[in-house]
Amino acid sequence: MTNLADLSTRFMPNWCPGCGNLPLWLAFKNAAVNEGWDNTNTALVAGVGCHGHIVNFTKLTSFEGLHGRPVPVATGIKLANSRLNVFAFTGDGDCLGEGGNHFIHACRRNHNITIILHDNGLYALTTGQTSPVTSHGAKTKSTPFGNPDNPINPLVIAIASGATFVARGYATDTAQLTDLIIQANAHDGLSVVDVMQPCETFNKSLTHTFYQENTYYVDKKYDPTNKVKAFDKALEFGLKKIPLGIIYKENKPSYESQITHLQGAPLVDVPADKRDINALFASYL
Amino acid sequence: MIIMPRKNVFRLKIGGQAGQGVKSTGLTFAKFASRSGFQVYNYVEYPSLIRGGHNVMQINVSATGVTGPSKFTDFLVALNQDTVDKHAAELVPGAFVLFDSEAKTDTSKIIGGVNLLPVPLDKLAHDAGGKDLLINTVALGVLAGMLSGDLEVLIELAKQEYVDKPDVLKSDLAAINLGYQFALDNFSELSSPIFKLEKDKTRPMEKRLVLNGDEAVALGAISAGMQFAAIYPMSPISNILHTLAAHQLEYGYIYKQPEDEIAAINMAIGASYAGARSMTATSGGGFCLMTEGYGLAGMTETPLVIIEGMRAGPGTGFPTWSAQGDLQFVLHAHQDEFPRIVLAAGDVTEAFYMTMEAFYLADKYQTPVVVLIDKNICDDEESVPAFDISSYRVDRGKFTKELDPEYKRYQLNQNGISIRSVPGVGNFFIANSDEHDEKGYSNEETDNRNQQMTKRMKKLETCESEDMQQPLVFGPVDADLSIISWGSNKGSILQALKRFTNVNFLHIGWINPFPSEFVSKFLAKAKKSLLVECNYTSQLGTLIKEKTGFDIKEKALKFDGRPFFVEDIEDVIMSHLGLAEGEAR
């Protein structure tokens, strides 16, 4: 059993007041308490960006890696120890800019890991430049005359690439986000939770107020297993038209479930030992 | 000083278009020779193409040992006109050229004194019940006949190759026999002075493996208990992954092909962090992409074995040609400083044992270990005595899976090595790419930075005193000329050294930490020192100067993608000894 206090480190978060990472962090910890995630069953990986600080405030064994690379590290951890719940925390710049290639291929391979995308619409740790999801025309420190680049849509990319659980949450609705994170981890396959996470310091358009006014939950009639409808839903983004909830879900064998010698015990349960390979040597005679 | 005559080495060359089976034929012949009691060294040249282009394989055969490629050819099997045109100049007087008698081969470039062996290769291949794919096999039969080889050995090889394909085997055996019989019927007079591939029944035959460096690395990794490998394909290391991929079910490790080299190294780091013995492999271009992960492994203190198979040229360069241009690169890649252990293998046998050693060092020092090999080692098969791993022990170093509430991943200590743990055992820690404190929390304080940096760098001193191995010295202690080199040059140098009584050779295998004291003493004693390297700026020479102060002025450098052939080394030795030998053949 995990208590909220068990997850505290000796550091308090150093995110800005009003930062969407704060409720996101709380939602994740609530999920951990609910599900009993602890240091015997869970590993966290983070990239670089404001999101990456989460490992310093969450007392779960973690790997803080390089900018853009949390997903391949998480993949390696899962392949080595498939018993672990593996979470890759990443940002919109980390995941879709520097790490775009890894994101696509991890989705394609359907690894049984959960990617939590801290999506604040720009680069915050480097004090406010455009990210791959920043809207066209937006004025930022790197685009003082307006952003000439068009944004990409992480949900569409995830579905098109083969992710089998694709959801969007809003950071401050911690109850729903907790539920999405729990479902994402329970899903056997690659899960992406795109979290609308306002940066009150640098992003003056994608604010808490904006999300509170313009998001809605997909209702019970929505069928997330229909891929074509899921694309339609994922493409919705605008005033009063930002869907939250599970956008796409598919039952498909995860990567790990297809690897013959990963069935049974995780790889690291068999200690590394010298192998007698005389039969293999003989094939070179 | 005495210059000895060349030992008897038979140099066969098979050439043809990419896709004509040159390599497989060469390898079969090499195994044929090895199983007949001879030692072999194969040297391959091929372009970065799948079909078309010119492929050649040289198979050097000797009863007394052969370790390097030659510039000359005693027997040329020409599967196309190109082979005759490109290699006619390498033929020595008395050499043989085997070609298809019905292919209108132009032999006008071939010098007098060379024996022509026209054989209806294509016709015999069809007679055998196969198509042109069997042309090579007919040629093998002719070779067996010409060299008085034991046909049973060749037949046994074919039986093993096609154990699951009885139809293919039948036509293969027919092709061997037709070629063999053709040689006996037509060339028996010509074949009397030729090298004989007869088993020497007077001495016991040592069984030897015939394999290349890529295969040796893969076998070394499997032997060492490797559990996870993520490798992106790239010449010249792809055969490492082919070998690993094929045997993962038998031995219970994972080979994963990632989306790129960045993913490769990060996956391997993730798996290692989770407790698996992990590796990756690449060539220089892929290592460019890996450099950030290289430092990440150093900073997070994650054990990792990286095989770097060097090829020539920046950019895409010379994809299928060899070089030794990455020594300074792997020593300096990544920003700032972290402890890296760098080893360089000199041949197939060293590639095997160094790979095993690299896993031991990575676990012990919790840091990346690079094993440099070059394309010649990757691709060239050698016959080597069976590997002996009886003394090897898998030691994961300071490592705990016990629950410790006070556990500190980066605890300060004297030798730089803290106790490592893994996720899933209850111990909380952060493997942190940010500068961190003992627990792993990000920390930017000066005292902590100084302590953690010093702790990490201390590992190299510990490694130097506890594990670093000294270079190897071959030849007499007292010599008129001392060669200093590394990597695959070793084979040609050793082969050349057999002809000189007054030349010795320092072969350097540990690059970082560097055996400065040993090298200094050697150079202080040397009457005349000569560096041999395959790069433009003499990167080992630069390192030696940095570490010892000795500036070796005499250099033989080569950067054209080709190896130092045995004769190149002989020529270099002669000229540095102030001698001139006439015909180098």
Image (tube, helix red, strand yellow):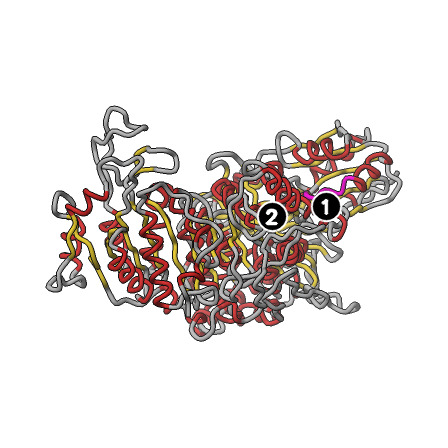
Q: Position of residue B441 (x, y in %)?
A: 52, 49
For disc 1, the neighbor class at 10 Å (few under 14, some 14 to 19, many from 20) is some
Give the letter of the chain under mark 2: B
Marked residue nearer the N-terminal end (2 or 1): 2
User: Nearest the camera: A5 or A137?
Assistant: A5
Q: Which residues are magenta?
A: B512-516
Tell me if residue B494 comes above or below residue A44 in the rendering: above
Would you identify the image quadrant in which residue A36 lies?
A: bottom left
Secondary structure state at the residue bearing disc 2: strand
User: Nearest the camera: A218 or B489?
Assistant: A218
Q: Which residue is mark 1?
A: B461
Image position of A181 (left or right of B332) = left
Observer able to see residue B31: yes
Q: Position of residue B94 (x, y in %)?
A: 67, 46
Mark carried by residue B370: 2
User: In percent of the image, x 23 and y 64: which residue is there?
Assistant: A250
Magenta region, mostly helix, strand or loop? loop
Amino acid type, residue under disc 1 in the picture: Glu
